[in-house]
Image (tube, helix red, strand yellow):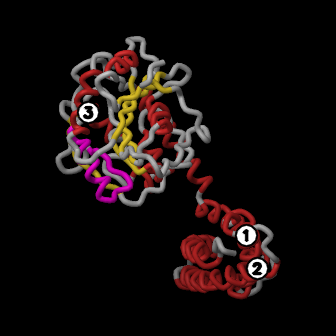
Amino acid sequence: MTRSSIPIPVPDGPHQVPSSSTSSLIELSLVLPTFNEARNIKTTLHTVHAILNSIPNLTYEIIVVDDNSPDLTWQLALDECSTLAEVRVMRRTTESGLATAVIRGWQAANGNILAVMDSDLQHPPEVLAQLVKAMRSGADLAAGSRHVEDGGVSDWSYVRRLISRTAQLIGLVLLPEVVGRIADPMSGYFMLKREAIAGKTLNPTGYKILIEVLARGSISRISEVGYVFCERKEGESKVSATIYLQYLQHLFRLRIGLLKESTFARFCLVGLSGVAVDMLLLFLLSDPSMLAWGLTRSKILSAEIAIGNNFLWNDSWTFASRVSPGSSMRSKFHRFVKFNSICLMGLIINLVLLNVMFNLLGMNRYLANGIAIGLTTFWNYFVNKHLGWRSSQ
């Protein structure tokens, strides 16, 4: 192992990026994932090195992460270290895949800005200067984009363009809150602040790591820089049907994972249990074949019992992380009073909607009740999240 080769780092978790040292003098760490790029790696390293050197006051490192290429890409990269002092090389022998290569490179990086680009010159290196400028202007993430002004693709066929756009559309359907944040969510050319993903567990599949970063990272401000995606001049393309299948797998896994982590999803699940309680009691109390009480009186009683059910589940599960350990019964009672008061306004809205739909529009009482519950769910969640449960409680 030479001075410029580094072992695979031991991470804090499966794929966690550690926080940077406050004493780090490196501003930018650029990762180049490689596999069988012997024809391109020398040109790429020298081109990228020259462009980064031209950026005023930039301290940087270039980390080549190679998946034990049979064509000895890693060895060729190591050979360049004697003239390019900023280059480091990681040769992986027990792990493979572009996305994990990027993360392993970031784990070994020293910079406060983490970046990735292709090593085959399909990502024009001159765009690096614009991305650095965007990061220095305060962006949490700066991405090269094919779908904004000055962006595009060079010689893609109609079929390839259609496949790419279809993949993005599927992403928008499955993960609108993630994919919809950026014009080119499938870009593999971007930079981000290390602290945006420090300590986060990243577990991407395939090539599209940007979606994972957007989903898991703490990213507020995004800047996009247009670029034209170029066809590779040397070597073979790695685009295949398998990559698109991995992309779909990644989307589904993220969708399920984000739902599990979402307090709103939990709140809705709890709400469904409340709906079951509410519907059952409404039937027992108001249905002509049961007690046949008045609709309004029956609704008030069934809703109040459902509210009690929902509070217990939300307090112990949905917002459990906001409840201080050892919270007293008095505090619990105060939270219940708040929850009840907030839900009371929702109940008033619910009653108005229910009576309008049932008495004026002639809608089935249970369908009307279900619609009214759905329309008040958002009110109950957001107000309870910010007022009913606070992290200080």
Label 2 crowd bin: few (<14), some (14–19), many (20+), radius 10 Å: few
Q: Which numbered mark, 2 or 1, is in the foreground of this view?
A: 1
Q: What is the x, y in percent for residue 336? A: 73, 80
The question of residue 136 being in magenta is answered with yes
Q: Quadrant of the C terminus?
A: bottom right
Residue at x 32% of width, y 37% of height: 164
Q: Rounded to the nearest whole Å, what is the CA distance between mark 1 and mark 3?
A: 51 Å
Q: Is residue 296 above or below residue 171?
A: below
Q: Rounded to the nearest whole Å, what is the CA distance between mark 3 and mark 2?
A: 59 Å
Q: What is the x, y in percent for residue 363? A: 57, 75
Q: Are marks 1 and 3 in contact (CB under 8 Å)?
A: no
Residue 297 appears left or right of 98: right
Residue 260 appears left or right of 49: right
Which image quadrant for residue 66? Answer: top left
Q: Which residues are magenta?
A: 126-145
Viewer-side residue, 208 vs 202: 202
Is residue 286 something one can see in this rendering?
Answer: no
Numbered badge on residue 263 = none
* Residue indicated by mark 3: 48
| Label located before the other in sequence (3 or 2) | 3
Per the image, label 2 sits on a secondary structure element best described as helix
Per the image, label 3 sits on a secondary structure element best described as helix
Q: Are marks 3 and 2 in contact (CB under 8 Å)?
A: no
The question of residue 359 being in magenta is answered with no
- Type of the residue with mark 3: Val
Q: Is residue 352 above or below residue 40?
A: below
Q: Are marks 2 and 1 in contact (CB under 8 Å)?
A: yes
Numbered badge on residue 331 = 2
| Label located before the other in sequence (1 or 3) | 3
* Residue indicated by mark 1: 324
- Type of the residue with mark 1: Ser
